[in-house]
Image (spheres, grey):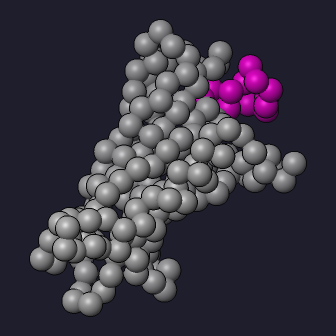
């Protein structure tokens, strides 16, 4: 298991357990899960080559933090998604462009919403960078429904080939 994946499992496990809006009220917040096999990206240059010199970009979700509050009708979840990326020899771009998604599911695992995001950050002079993307999610809640009736899923948007590559690496 790579170091970024270890960090994800450690940080996400304790994220958003319960949030406090005032001393007299505790809200149960949604669980946040970074999806296995969608937590890392290795994108190769076009062609059959798959050695390190063919890698255009590597990225990983390094950490997710957040908090939640409750207003009259919505559970408001503020998340910060930290993404690490490494510029490789086959990449001459001056910035990282990483696509990821956030989905909200109910207690029956029905997807209520899914939204894609494009995060951009300049490589500047370093080859490896970590940057943060701040998001605000509004989850409509009915009276008596707690935040733990929902799960927030996060993953990098991968092609089928990139997903197969991740799954083949995790079996080793």
Q: Is residue 158 visible?
A: no
Tell me how many marks there are. Answer: 0
In the rendered view, tell whether residue 21 sits above or below residue 108. above
Question: Where are the magenta residues, as a range?
Answer: 44-57
Residue lying at 72% horizontally and 40% vertically, measured from the top left: 2
Residue lying at 45% horizontally and 40% vertically, measured from the top left: 82
Q: Tell me if 37 is positioned left or right of 94 in this view.
A: right
Residue 56 forms part of the magenta stretch: yes
Q: Is residue 32 visible?
A: yes
The part of the image, by quadrant, that contains residue 48 is top right
Residue 104 forms part of the magenta stretch: no
In the rendered view, tell whether residue 96 sits above or below residue 154. above
Measuring from the top left, give residue 94's x and y in whole percent: 45, 17
Outermost residue, bottom direction? 144
Measuring from the top left, give residue 171's x and y in whole percent: 84, 53
The part of the image, by quadrant, that contains residue 35 is bottom right
Q: Tell me if 158 is positioned left or right of 142 in this view.
A: right
In the rendered view, tell whether residue 80 sits above or below residue 25. above
Along the line of sight, the residue nearer the viewer: 157 or 109: 109
Residue lying at 68% horizontally and 27% vertically, measured from the top left: 55
In the rendered view, tell whether residue 70 sits above or below residue 134. below
Outermost residue, top direction? 125
Measuring from the top left, give residue 7's x and y in whole percent: 60, 44
């Amino acid at each position: 298991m790579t170091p970024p994946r270890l960090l994800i499992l450690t940080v996400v496990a304790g994220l958003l357990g319960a949030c406090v809006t005032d001393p007299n009220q505790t809200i149960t917040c949604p669980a946040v899960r970074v999806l296995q096999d969608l937590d890392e990206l290795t994108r190769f240059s076009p062609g059959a080559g798959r050695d390190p010199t063919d890698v255009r970009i590597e990225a990983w979700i390094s950490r997710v933090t957040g908090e939640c509050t409750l207003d009259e009708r919505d559970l408001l979840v503020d998340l910060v998604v930290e993404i690490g990326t490494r510029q490789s020899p086959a990449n001459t771009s001056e910035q990282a462009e990483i696509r990821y998604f956030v989905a909200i599911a109910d207690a029956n695992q029905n997807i209520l919403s899914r939204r894609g995001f494009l995060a951009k950050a300049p490589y500047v002079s370093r080859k490896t960078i970590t940057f943060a993307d701040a998001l605000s999610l509004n989850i409509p809640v009915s009276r008596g429904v707690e935040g733990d009736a929902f799960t927030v899923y996060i993953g990098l948007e991968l092609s089928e080939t990139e997903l197969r590559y991740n799954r083949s690496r995790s079996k080793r």
